[in-house]
Image (cartoon, grey):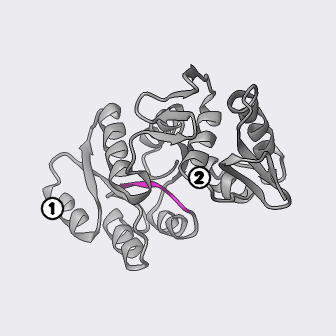
Amino acid sequence: MRILVVEDDRKVARFLQKGLREERYAVDVCADGETGAHWAQVNEYDVIILDVMLPVKDGIEVCREVRRRGITTPIIMLTARDALDDRVKGLDAGADDYLAKPFAFEELLARVRALLRRSQKYKTAGLKVADLEMDPVTRRVSRGGREIVLTGKEYALLEYFMRNPGRVLSETVIAEHVWDMDFDPATNVVSVYVYHLRQKVDKGFALKLIHTVRGVGYLMKAGDDDVA
């Protein structure tokens, strides 16, 4: 899952980026409202964390612009603790939730998870494809009752596959969703991670779940190993 953080306080932005990445989210960070509005329109995000007080264009205006353009990505507004007016304006502008500064990071994570659960794509708490199971709350992954230990990026990649079963995903689409804007498209990092994931998810099982669609990309389904 990919998150956009629009925050001009460098200390807060670094704190959010580090914490969210440790929770296996891909995170893009920008420091002004104009850039934030642009990135929200050209990239696909699962959640936007948006500060109210921003240079160039404030968070309320960014929120209004994003909603005017038909973007329904859940938005969490960050406001000063006593800024009731900002909170009301943010919600009226289209924000889904707000969090007053200073805040506990655990609360922010809980609010992010709640918004993801409420969004159409992430209604299901548990994910299952054949005998492969994932619990997004505990981060436990198992196949056939056997627990699978994954790195953070392997987990993020597998979660993306499991949330899109039967859908052919190109390397570009995978990179845009699982990695952030620091990703180098000239590398073969996606195929390398798919290989490692196969070693953990499919090796030793007759039924293969991660498939190659030659010349197109990858998909997750219970069936033949490679698809022409």
Give the residue drawn at x 38%, y 41%. 125
Q: Callout 2, which amino acid?
A: Pro
Residue nearer the viewer, 91 or 147: 147
Q: Callout 1, which amino acid?
A: Asp
Residue 142 lies, in percent from the top left, at: 56, 26
Q: Mark 2, residues whose alpha carbon is within 10 Å: few (<14), some, or many (≥20)?
A: some
Q: Is residue 108 left or right of residue 5?
A: left
Q: In the rendered image, is residue 151 in sight? A: yes
Which residue has dot 2 on it?
Answer: 165
Between label 2 and label 1, give the one nearer the viewer.
2
Determine the secondary structure under disc 2: loop
List the single residue furthest toward the bottom.
Answer: 68
Residue 195 lies, in percent from the top left, at: 79, 37
Give the residue drawn at x 35%, y 63%. 59
Residue 155 lies, in percent from the top left, at: 59, 35
| 225 lies above or below 97 | above
- The span from disc 2 to disc 1 (Cα, nearest Å) is 43 Å
Residue nearer the viewer, 108 or 57: 108
- Earlier in the chain: of badge 2 and badge 1, it is 1
Give the residue drawn at x 48%, y 29%. 139
Determine the secondary structure under disc 1: helix
Q: Start and end of the magenta stretch?
A: 44-50
Please tell me the numbered disc located at residue 145.
none
Task: Quadrant for residue 103, please give it.
Answer: top left
176 in magenta: no
Task: Quadrant for residue 189, please give it.
Answer: top right
Which residue has dot 1 on it?
Answer: 85
